[in-house]
Amino acid sequence: DDKVTFYEAVGGEETFTRLVRRFYEGVATDPVLRPMYPEEDLGPAEERLRLFLVQYWGGPRTYSERRGHPRLRMRHFPFRIGGEERDRWLAHMRAAIDDLALPPEAERMMWDYMVHAAHSMVNVPEET
Ligand code: HEM
């Protein structure tokens, strides 16, 4: 099977490393999101998000080797994620995706996925 995965098409590991690095630069300065992260060092969280996204888009399955089934909604239950948290998460992700300067179609696919995933992670009743 010589189908090129989305992961490969957008530049492989390097692209996802840049994406999550930029994303966590935003989280690090966010007064609402930063306190939600249990660890002082954001590095391990950055690594987990990177490995998850790499796997999701067709790259190596290291995430599941290390963490098992993603079950992301369940793993986010300890954190209060409402509309504001979701929108801040998405704003940092938007900036990180913009920085990649991907071809429009790839950019749109990645963004649509992030929007959908972030909405599905909300676990408190929506205020708005
Ligand atoms: C973990 C917040 C959405 C993927 C975490 C953690 C926090 C958090 C505080 C714990 C840090 C850690 O120890 O890894 C949020 C907030 C979101 C959000 C506020 C707003 C909607 C998402 C979305 C995805 C995602 C949309 C996927 C596209 C992950 C992954 C982990 C994680 C893969 C690590 C899970 C593990 O293996 O333990 N998130 N998250 N998150 N998040 Fe999110």
Image (tube, rainbow, N blue to C red):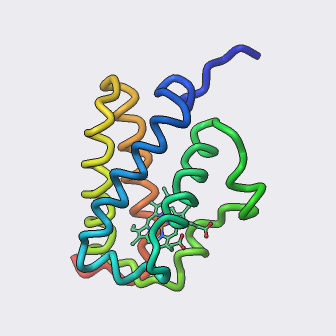
Instruction: Check the picture and name the quadrant holding the N terminus.
Output: top right
Instruction: Check the picture and name the quadrant holding the C terminus.
Output: bottom left
Reply above or below: 83 against 108. below
Residue 95 location (% of width, % of height): 25, 48
Q: Nearer the viewer, residue 39 or 56?
A: 39
For the view shown, which residue lies furthest in the top direction?
A: 2
Residue 106 location (% of width, % of height): 40, 29
Q: Nearer the viewer, residue 43 or 12?
A: 43
Q: Is residue 63 left or right of residue 92?
A: right
Q: Is residue 84 left or right of residue 61?
A: left
Q: Quadrant of residue 27?
A: bottom left
Q: Is residue 41 left or right of residue 52?
A: left
Instruction: Tell me how many marks there are.
Output: 0
Q: Nearer the viewer, residue 73 or 29?
A: 29
Residue 7 location (% of width, % of height): 55, 32
Q: At x 60% / y 75%, what residue is drawn?
A: 74
Q: At x 38% / y 44%, what residue is drawn?
A: 112
Residue 93 location (% of width, % of height): 33, 53
Q: Quadrant of residue 109?
A: top left
Reply above or below: 29 against 126. above
Q: At x 27% / y 65%, what residue is drawn?
A: 87
